Amino acid sequence: MSQHIPSSATVYSALLRADLTVQWRNRRASLLVILVPTVILISWKGLIEKFGGAFVLSNCMTVNLIAIGLMGYTNAIARDRDKGIFQRLRVAPTSAWSIMLSRLTVQLLMIVLNTTILFLVGYNLDHIAMTPGGYAFGYLTAILGGAVYLSLGQTIVGLIKNPETVNVATRLVYFIFIMTGMFGELGMLGKEIQAAVKWSPYGTVNRIVSHSLVPATWDHDSTIALLATIGYTLLFTLLGIRWFKWNSR
């Protein structure tokens, strides 16, 4: 008697529905992820006249991408691995890429959703208005920037097996990115830190997002930042795949 093996599309669809259900049940955590950049966006209203709406909005979007990649995705992967969920899925007739792709799809949907919320808050409360092209390119660069922090999260969860340690590590990295990125880019931490931040993952992502919101400002420096962003993503992805273990032992 032949055994029926479901197609990859069927398996992916089932995994995606399950991951979306889990994301919905953890919607309080998702609300916390969007809360911080939204508060920053509202509180930085006074900086719009000095630095421009694109600068303020791009920083908030970058903070949101860091939160999704590090606080959301990484901790969820570490928790599921510790519970043995990945081990059980690996026994099932499904490929490794289907398992990870469904989870990444959920995070990309979260990026689009949270970016939309920031656009709406920026428009209605801070009166930050972009052209249709600016919004379209903003979504695209948000996804590209989100890939950096999702891959960085994959590297962290690959390097560290204990879920509690992963949680501490992601919070620490998140704090460092936020503090050095936001204040360093403004030059409040010195010129050396400002120069370092410019080509850090925070700086390159923030720059491509900011310039994409106003397409007319895109220049050679923006293109170099885009290439650096892609380079960070490829590096972290390779390390994350190499180090990742399907179990916590």
Image (spheres, rainbow, N blue to C red):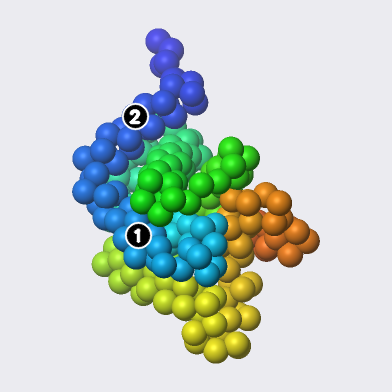
Name which residue lies at 70% across and 60% down.
222
Q: Nearer the viewer, mark 1 or mark 2?
A: 1
Residue at left offset 35%, top offset 60%: 42
Quadrant in the rendering for residue 218: bottom right
Measured along the vertical axis of the image, is residue 117 above or below residue 8? below
**Residue sitting at x 68%, y 63%:** 225
Q: Quadrant of residue 85?
A: top left
Label 2 SS: helix
Q: Which residue is mark 2?
A: 17
State the image coordinates of residue 57 (x, y, percent, origin top left): 48, 57
User: How far, Cα to Cα, is label 1 from label 2?
Assistant: 34 Å
Q: Earlier in the sequence, mark 1 or mark 2?
A: 2
Q: Residue furthest front?
A: 49
Mark 2 burial class by Cα count in 10 Å: few <14, some 14-19, many 20+: few
Residue 208, percent from left and from top: 62, 57
Q: Which mark is residue 42?
A: 1
8 sits to left or right of 192: left
Under circle 1, the secondary element is helix
Write the residue at 67% across / 49% down: 215
Q: How many marks?
A: 2
